[in-house]
Amino acid sequence: MRGQRTGRGPSMFLRMLMRAALVRRGRAASALLAVVIAAAVATAMMTLYVDVQVKLRKEFRRYGANIVVVAPESKTLAPGTMEKVEAGLNGRGLAVPFAYAVARTSDGSPVVVAGTDLERAQRLNTWWSVSQWPTAKEDALVGLKALPVVSPKSQPFDLTFDGRTIHLNPAGTLHTGATEDSRVYLSLADFTNWTGLQPSAIEIAATGSSEDISAMVTRLGQELAGVEVRPVRQIMEAEGRVLGKTRAALLASAILIILTAALCVLATLTGWVLDRRRDFAIMKALGASERLVSGFFAAEAAVIGAVGALLGFGIGIGVAAWIGEANFNSAVTPRFSVMPIVLVGSVAVALISSVLPIALLRRVQPATILRGE
Amino acid sequence: MFVRLVYESFRRQRRRKLLAGIAITLGVSVATAMIAVATDIGDKINRELRSYGANLVVTPEEDTLDVEIGGVNLKPASDGAFLSESDLPKIKGTFWRNNIVGFTPVLPVGVEVSDSSRASRKVELVGTWFQKQITYGKDNFTEGVHLTHPWWKVNGAWPKDDSGEVLVGERLAERLDVRAGSNLSINGTPRTVSGILSAGGEEDNQLVAPLAVAQQLIGRPGAVRRIYVSALTKPEDALARRDPKSMSPELYDRWYCSPYVQSIAYQLQETIPHSRAEQIRQVAQNEGTVLSRIKGLMLLVTLAALFASALAVSAAMATAILERRTEVGLMKALGAGNVSVASLFFAEAALLALFGGLVGFVFGSLLARQIGQSIFNSQITIQPVLFPIILSIAVIVTFAGSALSVRKAMRFDPVYVLRGDA
């Protein structure tokens, strides 16, 4: 061997490591497998814990707007407000304008008419049960309670506001169980053409943590002088609560699972090292120093820990992605920040599980072990 | 002889048995705690989801159209039909009374308020229950906005339900320049403002008063416009959405006895005369999705936990058995057959599993209780059915973990094993 001249120690050490793994492939493989599985489970749990907040926040956005921008009493928002809100959101949310007016039906009864961006409203208010979304001009979405008043036979109907009349076609019905049921919804273009009124409220479903949303409320409040910008407390508080509890439950489970996985590694590696007490005794009998032998077993354990952590990390990312896909229908993004934790943890557990049995064996005479007692 | 072998094995190899026993105990503890948490988390999160407030609303059957923008009603409050306040306690007598977390009647009326500067303005006053004591049968209940609108915050004091005090929404208070303790003239009657309400919704521009105050203002004692009901429900499925009228009697019974939001609405409607109950879709429709996501997540995590603890137990058993190769060799050299060796190991494994399973179950239950207490502030109930299930899982996993190693141990030639060469 080339290395003979320069330094026998390190190359011999490496050779011993290699041979130990190759000759007893089965035992080394089962130790490695334990580390891989534990690292995979730990990676998956940590990735999920980090990612679940983002995933659940997305689910919570189904509850609709968490910020509202409202014009002062019986006024409308200044033109350009919508653009300012859009700019302030910067793509991290959905803003939907709403304009309201009280119109009269042909027999004189009052009904609230709302103009909105119907396509956005559909995305914002996923719980709206709509028979058919209007598409054509002068199509209206009629609330279930408003229907008998404005168009009892689902025929086209007239509404009057401020002396101007609009002829509407009831394209679909809307059912929510709340005030929307008493209203007639039009596209914003039809509404402004008819009434000349601008939107008086903008409902915003902003994504992000509660701090992000508070910051956004403050920022919008500063940019839009004279209007009221407020978080929807009902939505924000409940979301924070449910999210907090879920994360806490997940954290508790993650800790339990990772501890169990570490225990599994400990049991397997300890067994693996104890099983090789004859190697240990022979090395000692041949004159290896205690430091060298301990170093050998520790190095072996560290290699297994590191290799297992890397393999396990890959598998764990896969498991997390699968859970994300199965439960949230969207992949979990790999978190490489988890990697160093998994690596350090695996190596540490592997070292502990090799050092413990070595400490036990050290007290025993090699001769006793070799005799098989 | 067999019993003696097992007994001696436990007596003489205490350390090894202890290690294997600890591994089983820990594995079973984690499994028990996780299963208990996972089976109960749906219920716990369902309760937390109630902080979104009411998911059902009961209105008069002949309800007139609301003409309301931004919390301001443009129709005279005395218009239309009402529900009767005296029917409300009956809600606590419905089949699903235990699922009904709380309910609150409301009666909005339009009033004129004038502050000290004598400027008068039209605002909406909502009469409601704050913490109303009601009695149904022999039981007492406290119902009101503290249950159905948990996000309401009051700076000052909540009004007593039998008082004439009012709450002023924070935006309105700013405009009227009133604070807790101020006086306000409502329709000419002076009233004390007990506190400023922060609701983060339309109520911020309104007055909120005890129900009796609102009833008195429109001269209709006992009248209620709407009832908000917050109920624990089961996520909607295909059966839930069917029309009860088109069901066969058995199907109808199943539908009626499932806490779907639809069937609870149906029962509320039966209970309160001349009423119509329906779900508030924003709250009711979404909680099912959120709930099933969280439940699904915990289920998958529990599977991971079961997998990890099964692995830990098998690993511990495998190690424990492989360490005893010499013993196997000796027994075989003395003429023991594979069957008797295996049965010795399995008997030991079974004893360990039963003992570890028992202790682990107790620890796991304590752990689950601790988790429930610290996260959800409520007990996690351990189903007694769980005990035999956990115990059998423990035995199966321990056997499975031992089986491979036992087979391996038996395959060694006793001669080599005893010489220490295997």
Image (cartoon, coloured by chain):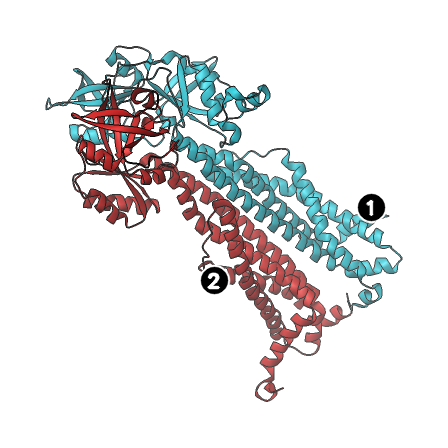
Chain colours: A red, B cyan
Q: Chain of mark 2?
A: A
Quarter of the C terminus of chain A within the rendering: bottom right
Alpha-carbon neighbours of circle 1 within 10 Å: few (<14), some, or many (≥20)? few
Asked where in the image residue A210 lies, by quadrant, the reply is: top left
Visible residue check, residue B398: yes
Dot in front, 2 or 1: 2
Callout 2 touching callout 1 (CB < 8 Å): no
In the image, what residue occupies the spot 48% across and 18% down?
B94
Q: How far across and down, in percent of the image, does residue A351 sit?
A: 57, 64
Frontmost residue, B294 versus A258:
B294
- Above or below, B133 against A346 in this view is above
Q: Secondary structure at mark 2?
A: helix
- Above or below, A128 against B303 in this view is above
Q: Which mark is residue A340?
A: 2
- For the image, the number of numbered tags is 2
Q: Tell me the amino acid under the disc marked 2.
A: Pro
Q: Residue furthest bottom?
A: A5
Q: Which mark is residue B211?
A: none
Frontmost residue, A278 versus B241:
B241
Q: Is residue B292 left or right of residue B279?
A: right
Q: Tell me the amino acid under the disc marked 1.
A: Val
Q: Residue furthest right?
A: B335
Q: Is residue A187 left or right of residue B10?
A: left
Q: Which mark is residue B3?
A: 1
Quarter of the N terminus of chain A within the rendering: bottom right
Q: How far across and down, in percent of the image, does residue A89 sit?
A: 28, 47
